[in-house]
Amino acid sequence: MFSETTANITVTVRPLFVPEQSKPAEDKYVWAYKVRIENRGSETVQLRNRHWKITDARGKLEEVKGPGVVGEQPVLRPGESYEYTSGCPLRTPSGFMVGTYEMERADGTRFDVRIPMFSLDSPHAAQRIH
């Protein structure tokens, strides 16, 4: 499990290799990752955008940007949390992900919340990253 807090917003990520969707003989490796976003502050915030940087074991970087997560832009009141599950395919047996969520306060100001870097390790990797 990987966790980081920015401006009273805690993001925790738990990656999991998905062998039933992976095909190592075809260089296809798939992970699911569960994310929990907790508002530990005193202001209501809304997740507006995401920005992921995904790097495979060869160093190839892919960036993914867009509105919300899994089709939603959740509102988190103080003390509330939001969880979702998504996935990531790679052409290598390991890699890592890191990113940010752009959040918006009730007064319209926006700020970035760091998503902790986490490793994508499979049993097919010669050496695990983490």
Image: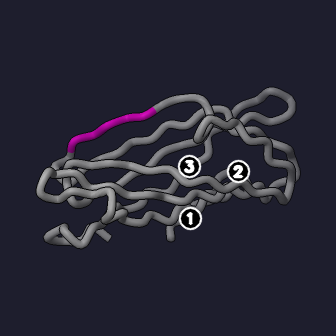
Tell me the residue that label 2 is attached to.
Answer: 7
Q: Residue at x 74, y 34 (%)?
A: 104
User: What is the spatial separation of the Cα atoms under label 2 and label 1, in whole angstroms?
Assistant: 14 Å
Disc 3 element: strand
Apparent side of residue 8 relative to residue 57 in the rendered image (left or right): right
Q: Which residues are magenta?
A: 60-64
Is residue 90 within the magenta segment? no
User: What is the spatial separation of the Cα atoms under label 3 and label 2, in whole angstroms?
Assistant: 10 Å
Q: Residue at x 58, y 62 (%)?
A: 12
Disc 2 element: loop
| Quadrant in the picture for the C terminus | bottom left
Residue type, numbered disc 2: Ala
Q: Is residue 4 visible?
A: yes
Label 1 or label 3, whichever comes before in sequence order = 1
Residue type, numbered disc 1: Ser
Is residue 63 within the magenta segment? yes
Dominant secondary structure of the residues highlighted in magenta in the image: strand
Tell me the residue that label 1 is attached to.
Answer: 3
User: What is the spatial separation of the Cα atoms under label 1 and label 3, in whole angstroms?
Assistant: 10 Å
Q: Residue at x 86, y 54 (%)?
A: 78
Apparent side of residue 102 relative to residue 27 in the rendered image (left or right): right
User: Dot 3, how many residues are within 10 Å of its Cα: few (below 14), some (14-19), or many (20+)?
Assistant: many
Tell me the residue that label 3 is attached to.
Answer: 114
Residue 95: assigned label? none
Q: Residue at x 58, y 61 (%)?
A: 4
- The residue mark sitting in front, 2 or 1, is 1
User: Dot 2, how many residues are within 10 Å of its Cα: few (below 14), some (14-19), or many (20+)?
Assistant: few
Q: Is residue 4 above or below residue 128?
A: above
